[in-house]
Amino acid sequence: MLRIVIGTYSHLMYGVDADLKLKESKPLWLFEAHDSALTALATNGLQLASTSSDETIKIYDHSRNIQIADLAIPTDLPNAISRNLCFTRKHLLACHDNGQITMWSRDSWLLVHTLKSSSQKGISGIAVHPSEKLAFSVGGDSKLRLWDLIRGKGGKILPLSFIPEGILFLNDSSFVVMSRRGLEGFKLDLSSVFSYQSSTQLNCLCLFQSNLIVGCDNGSLKVFDVHTGDLINEFAAHEKRVKAIYATSDNLVSASSDGSVHVWDKTFNKVMELQAPEGNRITCIVAMESAVNGPVIDAANINEESNESESDSESSDSLDESTEKATSSKRTKRARVE
């Protein structure tokens, strides 16, 4: 069973369970998750995070159909729209349009670090090293930034000759930066590994079966060798542009701007087709294996009982994790769908 969660431009979040053996799908929920278009989703298996241009982050336990936290972005961070979310073992990282990264504790859902950069052009991508001690980010200022996630401080800055759209670790010693027209592979010492130029616009990327997968504007998926950067496969995945892709251990899920969602196996054979609710433009997607079956959710049946827990702190570059003080965090204790 594969659980697929789709974020849409029309504020809605859509969940569906797909039985890949029986070729059957079961809608689980369709509700207005935010006041504006969803911009990013992230999952660590059980927990699901969503964010939107309404500058809020919501956390769910999707297996129990419960919202467990509602994170309020600090008011001293203007233009704080998040466009990237990333789970680590201890934190949730959110990248903002003001060039900053907020780190939230997964134990308390309190803000523990604010990683501040000098750029105001927004962060378009973040990649966390497998050790979870450091991360690289890219943004609209065409710079690659190194972050120390233990101390919450910035490090090296590398100017790029292009505007980056995404970044991804390929293994523990190399990573790739994607622009709309190409890929650049780097080692940790920032030396170049490979370079690839594309004739079609590149929109999204992920790792699947030790290969780099890139979704393109012409509806195709490109498959690259992570060591050499060589293009080893390319095939038509959708009729229109590929908006988002997401990989589990056994399957690759791709979503198009026309609302179609396709599931692929390890050999890139299409095993199932799904469709987002009519009239809903897809903005982001995640998937989880071995999902727990839950009741069908209707937006009209969603009732939330929330308690606010607020505490003040000054989140700075050198804030230690042991001082986990919150700037603001709404803690939703119960939001169950009956």
Image (tube, grey):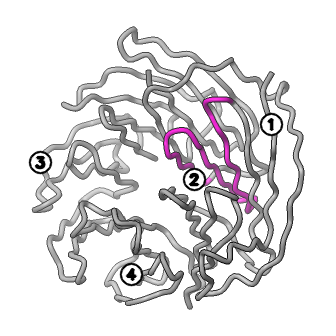
Q: Quadrant of the N terminus?
A: top left
The residue tagged 1 is 335
The mark that comes first in sequence, 4 or 3, is: 4
- Return the residue nearer the eye: 187 or 240: 187
The residue tagged 3 is 232
Label 4 vs label 1: CA separation?
Answer: 39 Å
Question: Callout 2: helix, strand or loop?
Answer: strand
Depth-wise, is mark 3 or mark 2 nearer the camera? 2
Residue 211: percent from left, percent from top: 20, 49
Q: Is residue 114 left or right of residue 151?
A: right
The residue tagged 4 is 144
The mark that comes first in sequence, 4 or 2, is: 2
Predominant secondary structure in magenta?
Answer: strand
Q: Is residue 59 magenta?
A: yes
In the rendered structure, which amino acid carries the disc numbered 1?
Ala
Label 3 vs label 2: CA separation?
Answer: 29 Å
Q: Is residue 217 magenta?
A: no
User: Answer yes or no: do the residues labelled 4 and 1 have beta carbons within 8 Å?
Assistant: no
- Mark 3, Cα crowd under 10 Å, few <14 / some 14-19 / many 20+, is few
Which residue corresponds to the image point at 27% horizontal and 68% vertical from the top-left? Answer: 175
User: In the image as oriented, which residue stretches furthest toward the top?
Assistant: 22
User: Answer yes or no: do the residues labelled 3 and 1 have beta carbons within 8 Å?
Assistant: no
In the rendered structure, which amino acid carries the disc numbered 3?
Ile
Question: Callout 4: helix, strand or loop?
Answer: strand
Residue 180: percent from left, percent from top: 36, 64
- Return the residue nearer the eye: 262 or 328: 328
The mark that comes first in sequence, 3 or 1, is: 3
Residue 138: percent from left, percent from top: 43, 75
